[in-house]
């Protein structure tokens, strides 16, 4: 049994260890139009502890915006 096998699928992508917020929860907020750290924090609890996850959240946002932008070509 691999180390990650005991962790449920929805908890493997934890972005904020302080609140247990996952990437999926953060992406759902992006889908709702919440695209700033303060809004994400209010909605999920992420970035309300140590703040170490803010760069990961910004990377998720950049990835989300890139995927959502129309192809210029």
Image (cartoon, rainbow, N blue to C red):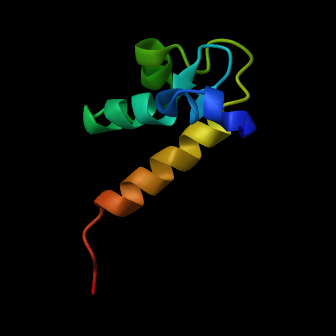
Q: Quadrant of the C terminus?
A: bottom left
User: How far from the left and from the top, in percent, is residue 8?
Assistant: 53, 27
Left or right: residue 52 compared with residue 5:
right
Residue located 34% across and 30% down the image? 29
Nearer-the-camera pick, 10 or 61: 10
Q: Quadrant of the N terminus?
A: top right
Nearer-the-camera pick, 11 or 51: 11
Whether residue 46 is situated above or below residue 5 in the rendered picture: above
Q: Residue furthest front?
A: 1
User: How far from the left and from the top, in percent, is residue 32?
Assistant: 25, 31
Specify the quadrant of the image occupied by residue 27: top left
Residue located 66% across and 40% down the image? 55
User: How far from the left and from the top, in percent, is residue 46?
Assistant: 56, 20
Left or right: residue 69 compared with residue 22:
left
Residue located 66% across and 31% down the image? 53
Q: Residue furthest bottom?
A: 73
Left or right: residue 26 compared with residue 72:
right
User: How far from the left and from the top, in percent, is residue 12?
Assistant: 58, 34
Left or right: residue 56 compared with residue 3:
left
Residue located 47% across and 46% down the image? 61
Specify the quadrant of the image occupied by residue 28: top left
Whether residue 2 is situated above or below residue 48 in the rendered picture: below
């Amino acid at each position: 049994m691999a180390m990650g096998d005991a962790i449920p699928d929805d908890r493997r992508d934890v972005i904020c260890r302080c609140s247990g917020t996952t990437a999926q929860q953060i992406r759902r907020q992006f889908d709702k139009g919440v695209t700033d750290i303060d809004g994400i924090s209010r909605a999920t609890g992420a970035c309300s502890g140590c703040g170490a996850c803010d760069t990961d959240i910004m990377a998720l946002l950049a990835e989300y915006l890139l995927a959502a932008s129309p192809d210029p070509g």
